[in-house]
Image (cartoon, rainbow, N blue to C red):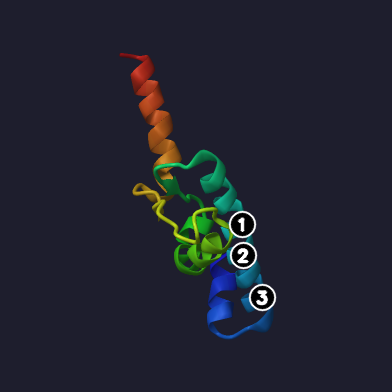
Amino acid sequence: MAEIRELALKQDVAAMKTMERLTTFFGKAISVVINIVDPDVIVIGGGVGRIPEIYSEGRKHIAKYIFNNGTVDTPIVAPILGDSAGVFGAAYLTLDQHQ
């Protein structure tokens, strides 16, 4: 995804279309989660979570599909521990079982 993002920033047409599709479908998918579950926060991990447009353009697309008049109150954030969040979680579960 990082390479596609870089190409889109250089005005590569196919990459720009891909980024538009990514943010559009991200907005649709996350709006369903917000509309049904109403979470306190949404953490976006993995490679997609490192794409800044998810948090800007993606948020605009969420607003199009959300039930509450286009106001996105749910924080959408990257994991504080980055790509290592899963490893830390697994380590925590192991520690928790041995105490």
Neighbourhood count class around disc 1 (C-alpha, 10 Å): few under 14, some 14–19, many 20 upward: some
Q: Amino acid at mark 1?
A: Lys
Q: Closest to the observer: 65 or 93?
A: 65
Q: CA distance from mark 2 to mark 3?
A: 10 Å
The residue positioned farthest toward the bottom in the image shown: 11
The residue carrying mark 2 is 24
Element at label 1: helix
Label 2 sits on a secondary structure element that is: helix
For marks 2 and 3, the one nearer the N-term is 3
Residues tagged 2 and 1 counted as in contact (Cβ below 8 A): yes
**Residue name at image x 35 percent, y 47 percent:** 81
Residue type, label 3? Lys
Q: Which residue is mark 3?
A: 17
Image quarter of the N terminus = bottom right
Q: Are marks 3 and 1 in contact (CB under 8 Å)?
A: no
Badge nearest the viewer, 3 or 1: 1
| Neighbour tally class for label 3: few under 14, some 14-19, many 20 plus, Cα within 10 Å | few
Q: Nearer the viewer, residue 60 or 53?
A: 60
Residue at image coords 66%, 75%: 17
Dot 3: what SS?
Answer: helix
> Which residue lies under the disc numbered 1?
28
